[in-house]
Image (tube, grey):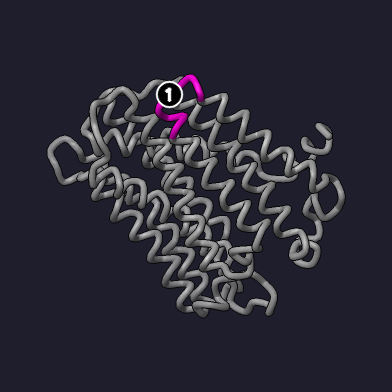
Amino acid sequence: MITRLTRYALAYPLWFYAAAGLGWSYGLTAVYQAAHRSGRAPAASGLAVTAATIAVTLLLFRAVDDVRDLDYDRVQNPRRPLVTGAVRVRDLLLLFFLGMVVLLLFNAPRGVPAAGYGAVCGYVCLIVFLDWRWKWPSADRLLLQLLVNVPLQTLICGYVYLGATHGYDTLPSGPDVAAALGFVLSLTHLEFARRLVRAPEPHTRTYVHALGVDGTVRATLACAFAAAGLELVATRPWSPGQAAGWLVLIALPVPVIAAVRFHRGAPRWSTGLAVLYLLLSFSSFAAIGLLNTL
């Protein structure tokens, strides 16, 4: 089974999960620090635990999605490891539940942040139970799925917040909420972008079926610009000594370029540019943290 799970993990871009873990951990922490006007560098050990936890958690989510989407993938993604038989359903279910337990134990010594991760696990288990018991929400109802996933991503942002501010005598403020929602919208931009096709097949899962091509383009761009606006609210770069916050705008030209290419006739929105936008966003957040600690 270990061999099968190893093959399964290697079938996916592990570098992206690692980058997402680092971006979510260090990047979002940097914005939280800027929101609190704190020049204190966060503990490297805590950031490493948060980054590793998020990266592995995302892979566990992938396993659950593969089990749920097996029938769809047999037609649309026949090379997925679960479809080819490289891994079994019971392997992925064991990976998910055992992985959650291990990550909870991994975080247990951290105290309050561990409770935050416990909330993430609880919400995920609720989603899994609803899907197993009532097949709700349907994987074909993408907008409803999105509404279910946004609270999950927000809870992960809350877990990062508890790690970033652990030991501070402070409660979440408006800028903290803006930072978290901006981060979630950056992820939502990728979600819309990677499914945006000009002429989808009837059974392809894309937001175009619900919003139309133009509506999906507007939603994709709106997420990117709204994310930047919220991060500006969090960092307030117009305040004295906070000019580093303007770096959140660095990633915005990327979705604009992608929109121009799509407008000129590209059959689908560039997934590569959507990923680049997210990585640049992560990098800009990290740069803000670095500059604020100098």
Position of residue 110 measured from the top left corner of the image (x, y, whole percent): 45, 22
The kind of secondary structure the magenta stretch mainly shows is helix
Q: Nearer the viewer, residue 152 or 286?
A: 152
Residue at horizontal 76%, vertical 61%?
73
Magenta stretch: includes residue 172: no
Q: Position of residue 185 (x, y in %)?
A: 41, 56
Magenta stretch encompasses residue 114: yes
User: Nearest the camera: 20 or 280?
Assistant: 20
* Residue neighbourhood size for the residue with mark 1, other residues' Cα within 10 Å, grouped as few (<14), some (14–19), many (≥20): few
- Range of magenta residues: 108-115
Amino acid of disc 1: Gly
Q: Which residue is mark 1?
A: 111
- 36 left or right of 90 in image: left
Q: Residue at x 64, y 76 (%)?
A: 200
- Residue 286, by quadrant, is top left
One can see residue 183 in this view: yes
Residue 234 against residue 6 in the figure, above or below: below
Name the outermost residue toward the right: 85
167 and 80: which one is in front?
167
Q: Residue at x 49, y 25 (%)?
A: 48
List x then y, in percent, for residue 230: 29, 53
Residue 170 picture location, percent across and down: 24, 31
